[in-house]
Image (spheres, rainbow, N blue to C red):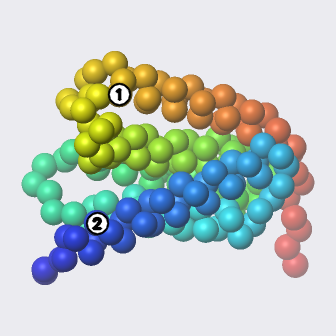
Amino acid sequence: MFLDLAALTLVHVLISLAGIASGLVVLYGLLTGKRMDGWNLTFLTTTVATSASGFLFPFFTLLPSHITGIISLIVLSIAILARYRQRLAGAWGPIYAATAVLALYLNVFVLVVQLFLKVPAINALAPTQTEAPFAAAQGIAFLAFVAAGYAAASRQRPMRRAQTA
C-alpha cells in the first residue's frame, strides 16, 4: 500500500497540535473544576489519533517513538475508562486527571523532541539531543507536568456514580 508520507506527516502533525491545544484547555478545566465535556472528547479523540497514526509511518524496527505511542495508548485507555465507563466516580476522578495530564505530557515530550530535530535554530542548540538545552527543555516540561498533574488530581472531588435506568 502506498502512503503519501508528506500528507501523512501533515495530518499527523495537525492532529498532534490539536491534541496539545485541546489538552491545555482540558488541563485548565481540571485545575479550575470545569468539566468541559466537549474539550475532553476532542482531546481524547485527537490524542488517540495522534498515537495511532504514528504507527502508519514505515518502520523496520521498534523505535522510541513507537514505545511512546504504546505507552500513550495504554494511558489513554485508562483515561477513557475513567471518564466514560466509570464516569469519574470515586477514585476515577483523580485517575482521569492523572492519566489525561500524562497523555498531554507525552504529546508535549514528543513536540519538544520534534522541535529540536526539525527547527534549525533549536537544533543548533542540541543537534544530538544529548546536550544541556535539550535536557533543560525536557526537564522543565516534565516538572511542569508533574506539578500540574498533582494539582489536577488533587482537585478532583469524588463523585457518586450516576444511576442508570
Residue at (83, 55) in percent of width and height: 34
The three-letter code of the residue at mark 1 reads Phe
* 73 horizontally vs 56: left or right: right
The three-letter code of the residue at mark 2 reads Thr
Residue at the disc numbered 2: 9
Label 2 secondary element: helix
Residue lying at the far top of the rendered structure? 132
- Crowd band around label 1 with a 10 angstrom C-alpha radius: few (<14), some (14–19), many (20+): many
Residue at (68, 65) in percent of width and height: 39
Tell me which numbered mark, 1 or 2, is placed earlier along the sequence.
2
Label 1 secondary element: helix
Counting from the top left corner in percent of width and height, residue 18 is at 52, 63
Q: Quadrant of the N terminus?
A: bottom left
Of residues 114 and 92, which is closer to you in this image?
114
* 47 horizontally vs 65: left or right: right
- The answer to whether residue 54 of the structure is visible from this angle is yes
Residue lying at the far left of the rendered structure? 60
Q: Is residue 56 above or below residue 106?
A: below
* 20 horizontally vs 32: left or right: left
How far apart in space, not on screen, are marks 1 and 2 (Cα)? 23 Å
